Each structure stands twice: as C-alpha cells, then as structure tokens.
Amino acid sequence: MNTFSLILVNLGRNKRRTVLTLLSVTVALFLFCALSGVLDTLDEAIHVGSETRMVVRNHMSLVFPLPLSMEQQLTAMPEVSSVAVQNWFGGQDPANPHNFFPQFGVESQTFFPMYDSEVDIIEASPPQGAAAVPAGMNPKLASFMEDQTAALVGSDLMKQEGWKLGQTVTLNGTIYPGSWPFTIRAIYRSKVKAFNSAVFFFHWKYLYEKSNQQATAGIYKVMLKDPSQAAEFARKVDALYENSANATHTESEREFAAGFISMYGNLPFVIRVIGLAVVFAILLIAANTMVMAVRERTSEVGVLKTLGFTDATIFTMVLIEAAAITVTGGLLGALGAKKLVTGFNLGGALPPMTVRWSTVWTGVAVALVIGAVSGLIPAVQASRLRIVNALRRVD
Amino acid sequence: MAIPLSYNVRNVIHRPIATLTTAVGIGLTVAILIGALALASGFQAALRTTGSPNNAIALRKGADDELSSGVTRETSEILRARSDVAAGPDGRPLASSDVLVLTYLPRIGQPGGSNVTVRGIEPSSLALRSGVHVTQGRMFNPGADEVIVGERMSKRFASCRIGDRLKFRQQEFTVVGLFVAGGSGFESEIWGDNAVLMPVFRGDVFQSVTLRMKDPSRFDAMKKELENDPRLGIQLKRENEYYADQSSLLAGVIRFAGVFITLIMAVGAVFGAMNTMYAAVGARTREIATLLVLGFSPLAIMTSFMIESVLLALCGGVVGCLLALFINGIQTSTTNFQTFSELAFSFQVTPQAMVIGLIFSAAMGVVGGFLPALRASRQPLARALRAL
C-alpha cells in the first residue's frame, strides 16, 4: 500500500464530508469564475471594437446630435472611404415600456457595407428582393432595402421578443414622438463579438422623413481607406470643428466602446471584492473540514508514525488530501462556469459573456491555494503529533 | 419535554474553531447580500429624496426623461401663469423652467469618464428645491458664465473644483461654488443660469418646467387639465415620483444580481454548515443516546439540533451584519443607464436589509441543519450507547 492509496482511503472514509466539501468548493469556484467572466467580458468589450472604423460624436456628449451638413464634409476628406449616419431611436414597445432593447436608424446604403464581413443575413422576407443592392452590400438585404419602414433585427432579439419575420412591430418614440410602425424584413446574426446580435436596425431615411426632417445625425461612422491614418484623421476632424457650434470628438470604434465600459465606474472593483469574499468564505469552510478530518484520525496518525511513516510524509499526505478535494471541486466549478456562463447575454452595451481559459486556470490555481492553506494547520498538527499522545488519546 | 436552549449554546461555544469558521463563512455570504441590498437602497434613496411631492414637473408628452423632452417658451409661460402655482417670496411664481444637457467629463483616479448632468435653472426659484445650499464658494450670479457643482461630483470628475473652467460648446464657464442637496440626485449635477445656458445648449427650448403647487392635493385635477390641453402637449408628474421612477431599472438589476450571487454562495456555505453539524452530531453520539434513554423524544432531539444549527448560522448572520456596517455610507457613483447620466450615492445599510440578512442566515441554518438533525434523532439506541 503506497502513500497515494492511503490518501484515497482517507478521502473515502467519510464520503459525505468529502462530497460536501467538494461541492462547496465547486459552487464557490463556479461563482468566482462566473464573476471573473464578467470582468473578462468587460475587458473584451474594450478590445473587440474595430480600430479602422471611426466614430465622430458631439464633443459635449453623445446625446447631442451633429448637423447633417457634416456628412458631405467628411465624405470629401481624402482619407475617408465611406460615411454612415447612425441615430439612437429610444422607442418603446407600448405593451411593455420597460422592455429595453437598442434601436438604431442607420444610413443603410453605406452602413451595412461597412459591416458586411461581420454580419450574416440569415433570413429575409420576401427571400428574394427585386432590385439590386448598392455595391458591397449583402444581396440578401434587397427586401430590406426596398421597404422604407423595414427593420433588420438581430437573431437574439427575435428570440427574446418572440417576433416573426415579416411581422409589423410598432414602437412609441420617446425622442421622436409618435407611433412608429416597422416591418421586420430581415434577420441578421453577428459573426464577431463586437457586433451585438440584439439590435433593431431601420432606415435612417424613415426616421428623417417621418420626423418631419427633424432628425439629424446622432453619430457618424466613418470607414477609412487606410487604417494607419486613424489617429491623424481623428485629430484633423476634431481640429476642423473645434470652433464650430458642434465641436466633435473622433475616436476609433474600439475607443468608443471602451468609453461605454468606463461608465460602469466602480463595477469591476465591486466584482473583485465579491470574488475575494467568496474565496475567503470557502477557504474557511475547507479549513474547518480538514481540521475535523485530521482530528478524528489522531490515533491513526499515531499508528502510521509507529509503523515508520516520517513526519514529512504525514504532512504531505494531509496537504495532498486537502488539495485533492479543492482542486477537483475547483476544476468542476471553473469548467462549469466556462460551460454554463459563456454566451449568456448581459444586455446593454456588452457582448455576450466570455469566460476565458486563463480565468478557468486562475480558478483552479485559487482552488489549489485554498487546498494548501486549509490543509496547512491540520498538516502541521498531524506531523508534530507525538506518538505517545496520539495513542493515549481516547475520545 | 424540550431540551434546554443552554445545552445548544454551550455546545456552540465548546467548539470555537468550527463555530468561528462556519459562522464567518455564512457571515460573508450574508455580508454580500446586505451589501448588494445597501447598494440598491443607496442608489434608490438618492433618487427618492430628489424632488418634492409639492412640486410638479412638466415634460413633453411621450418623453421618458428630461433629456428627450422639450417644452417651448410659450408652454412654459402658460404653465407659470396658472393660478394654482404658488408664489415665491418675491411674488413671482415659484417655478423653474430648466434646460438640461449631459456633458462628458473624465473621471478622477479612474480611466474613462461619464456623462454628467448640466442643468440651467431659474436663479430666482432656488427655493423650489429645498435643502439646496452652497457649502463652498458662492452661488452663481444670474446672467454670468458661472456654474455651481454638486459636492459629490467635484470629487469624482475633472475640472469640477472651484476656479476650474468647464467648456460647454464654445463658451467657458467658471466653477464658483459647490453645493449639497440633502444627498439627493441634484448633488450629482452642475447648475447654472438657464438664461445663460439655454442659447449655448439647444436653442429656444426648455427640457422641463418644475412648479410648486399651491395645493398639492389638487395634483390629479391639475394633471388631467394640463394633459388634455392640446396647446401644451405635455405630461405632468409629481417631481419626487418622476425621480424615483428613474431608479427602478438599475436598483432592480442590482438586487437581482445580489440575490443571485448570494444564493449560489449560500449553497456553498450551507454545505459547510452541514459538515459542521454532522461533525457535531457524530461527536455526541453517546450523549444523544443518553438523552433518548432519559426520555427525550426523537422530535425533541431533532428540534434541539435544528436550534443549534440555526444558532450557529445566526452567529454568522450577526458577523455578516457587522461586516456590512463597514460599507455603510461609502460613496460611489455609476451611470444610470435609464437617464444615461452619472449618479453619485452612498451605500445605505438599512435595518430592513440587516433583518433580511439575519432571516437569510437562519434559513441557511435550517437547510444546513435538517439532515444532520434528522440523523441525530434516528440514532439506533443500542449501538449509540456502545459507541466509544
């Protein structure tokens, strides 16, 4: 019988306790990894955006629009390959005003070609449009392009709202008053993390005309000919408008997304604190279990020592036993988080949840540390135990 | 006959390490629950204390918040001239037609920034919002390019200290004072003269008109009359309700997330408590048998162990409450995505949250203690007495 099988036997001697401890570590590490996953997702959201597409917004704040005259000026700049207006609509479903989902009026002819490689059109109604689409646009968008009131809806949003292709959806405008009917002409699925699969797109032209030409530009999306000109282009645009009534702030889509994330403020810190509390709580629980486990085998340890097991061997045995429980639990919990939490939609401006492999391994490492620390006291106690005392004790 | 409570108390004290580790495990779970509730309450409290039930706020029909609202000067004049609007000390109507915008400012000590609300108010109607007073510096002068900043914002955002200059569009404004407003959402704003800010921002349109009602109990009648007036195209809300509504979304999300996280964590803590209670039962096999022989019913034994488990968990609950007290009053801020603007607030550990925490810990004790207690009450007598 070697040391390894002795450890196995020890783990099995009180199966209920081993299982309970293992499960509590599993649950804790699941939570730890799921919370770290939120941090991964925030981090991802900062890094996934394109660095070659630029966003021009009002310097004062995103909620201020920009004049329409800017479009021509931007398009005429030598660095620019295309420009598209994008407006936040902020409409509400009259049946359920608190059900929030993002809606954008976009300049379809230029907007969708910009995102052609990132978005798949999975269904359209009617499936074949009659007219040709502008260059660079997915031909499946033909029926969307033909209908002034058409909407292009993300697959996740379709599922969430239980909508059907071809259906008419009426929204109440909050920024643009009135009742706005839309017909769902196409459904898209995002191929990249940066592009949200739960957005409601429609023609900016519809917004402009139905609002009695009140709508201006929320932001401009600008595609550059040469991505390396991004920083220079941003400086140039902002300098151009600096002393106009509408000073601009130009940044890459990536920086724009990062700006949104920073609005969450202290959230990452709060999540870290909770994660630490979870780990510490579980450390205490695991330590308590190990102390109990070793205490009830005091006389056994005495026997082992009598048989010639060294203090160091006993010490290692207890530590390995503790680590075996916590690392198994940690693996289960971390992998469980990876499996269950990934893809979960947090809503808002965030891409679907990501749990990175590095987070999974961090979780396992944390579990190992919990095992080592929780096993330390009982391991020291057991290794220092004098045979006489161990064998004399009766309880 | 029931087993005396002191038996359980002594037993809990008898195993200090097991009690302490289990209790702290449960305590941390409870602390996180209370912490989440305190975060939500603090956020909600900031908005709930904003505005007064004696004031009514008019927004454009269909607009959810001031940001998307627009009220014409004409409408504003009609509203102010009404006979049911209270008069200020100067005899003029106690009403403020506000212009409101957001400005993106960088945070201090953290990367990135957020949108801060800038409100142009009627300087003569400061009395409309009670509890507002300037703590440092002075009030802005009517007609001047000056603003005052909520105290909470000035610590969190760049260019918000006295003497700093803020640029809105092409015009620069000097920060001349800091103000408090009883912990309300107004403290997260920057205030200036509406007459000066209006042309800078969106031209000749107000975002809201707030007025003091002569008789607040007549609000419903007033609301009905104004909302049915086709000239106006406005909706009327009680000011305090308008602001309180803005907290529902985020407070709901925080509560949901807090309870969700706590429930998962509680599962882990309950397993730990079960371990401790099983060990307690195991160590007292002979004792329990003796009690049974003495005539205590299995139900009494079970009850006793359940009580012991709940007692242990309640110790944890108390630890949790004490831990949570440390976060009470800590200030933080976040973007309220309902209004897209930053709101500063403090954690508020309410007695109610602590009671919920204690009840929650007791529930963990019940769940964790049930199986071990059941086992204790079902000891086979003969074998238990023989056990060493």
Image: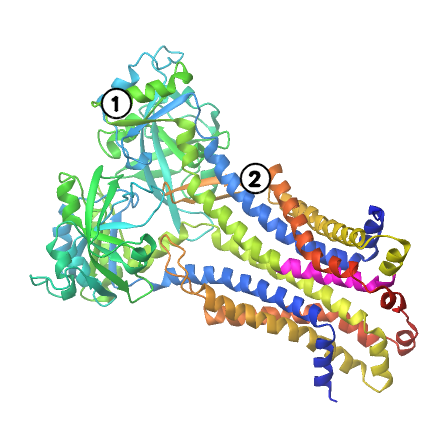
A159 left or right, relative to A394: left
Percent across and percent down for residue B262 are 57, 53
Q: Residue at x 52, y 53 (%)?
A: B260
Under mark 1, the amino acid is Asn
For marks 1 and 2, give the one nearer the viewer.
1
Q: How crowded is the residue under tag 2: few (<14 C-alpha within 10 Å), some, or many (20+)?
A: many
Percent across and percent down for residue B269 are 65, 58
Q: Quadrant of residue A386?
A: bottom right
Q: Residue at x 69, y 52 (%)?
A: B365
**Any part of residue B163 in sight:** no
Q: Earlier in the sequence, mark 1 or mark 2?
A: 1
Q: CA distance from mark 1 to mark 2?
A: 41 Å
Whether tag 1 and tag 2 are in contact, CB under 8 A, the answer is no
Along the line of sight, the residue nearer the viewer: A345 or A84: A345
Along the line of sight, the residue nearer the viewer: A257 or B298: B298
A393 left or right, relative to A253: right
The secondary structure making up most of the magenta span is: helix
Along the line of sight, the residue nearer the viewer: B44 or B142: B44
Magenta range is: B268-286
- Residue holding disc 2: B348
Q: Judge whether B290 appears above or below A57 on screen.
A: below
- Residue holding disc 1: B228
